[in-house]
Amino acid sequence: MTLFDAVRQLRDASPDVTGRPRVIAIDGRGGAGKTTLAERLCKVEPNSAIVHTDDVAWNHAYFDWGGVLAEHILQPLHRGESVNFRPDAWISHDRAGSITIPAGADFVWVEGTGVIRDELGPWLDASVYLQGDLDEQERLLVARDGDSSEQQEHVTNWLREELPFMLRERPWSRATLIVAGPPRIDHDPDTELVVAAPIR
């Protein structure tokens, strides 16, 4: 499937959206390639913005951030408003900047492990789940986050919470599209996605 076809399918999944951006969730385990996919989709739809749930969760919690995301980002987007949000942890730890989304975007891609969840269902117009090899994704997570003792502890704690959360929420069963990542089928990674069969 081409990236253009994927965007068309995600748009068609929410045909009645007017006056606000379509909010599309991109989920998958750590290291699956969610951020890369969001960036690729942004190139297809230039009037887009990306929200990283890691920014919402920063120094807050691995997965207990759904209410914060809904209240401060998803609900304003549904009202057609811009977003300029500094999470409490950013303030208390003196992290500069804020999570900003201008009004008038056509799409907002919300990427992060655990974003396709029951409590956020009312605020998501469509979703993508990146399905991959569990062992490979754990290797990529360690490679991305570093191998210091502090980072190893972080990865261990993350994995301890990640799998039970994903098994409870079953994001793949709710997804509009399931994308194989990283796929072993020959394709053009700049213009195409390898789409997997729905998992129920």
Image: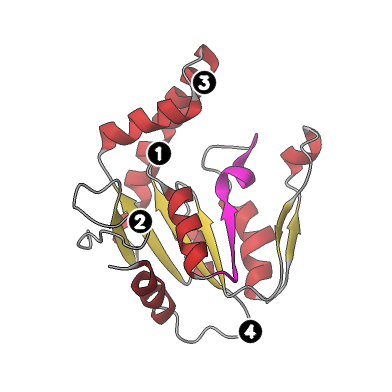
- State the SS at label 3: helix
Q: CA separation, marks 4 and 1?
A: 34 Å
**Closer to us: 49 or 123:** 49
**Camera-side residue of 96 and 71:** 96
Residue sitting at x 32%, y 65%: 177
Taking the image as drawn, is residue 116 in sight? no
Q: Position of residue 61 (x, y in %)?
A: 58, 37
Q: Is residue 173 left or right of residue 112?
A: left
Residue 191 sits above or below residue 86 on the image: below
* On screen, residue 5 above or below 163: below
- Residue 19's disc is 4
Is 51 magenta? The answer is yes
Report the magenta residues as a range: 46-59
Residue matched to label 1:
31
Comes first in the chain, label 3 or label 2: 2
Q: Disc 1 and disc 2: Cα gap in Å? A: 13 Å
In the image, taking residue 59 as reference, residue 109 lies left or right, namely left
User: Which residue is at the far top?
Assistant: 149
> What is the distance, in whole Å, between disc 4 and disc 2 at their CAs?
26 Å
In three-dimensional space, the C-alpha distance between marks 3 and 2, rounded to whole angstroms, equals 26 Å
Give the x, y percent position of residue 99. Answer: 70, 53
Q: Amino acid at mark 1?
A: Gly
Residue at image point 45% right, 85% down: 15
Classify mark 4: helix, strand or loop: loop
* Callout 2 amino acid: Tyr
**Which label belongs to residue 129?**
2
Secondary structure of the residue carrying numbered label 1: loop
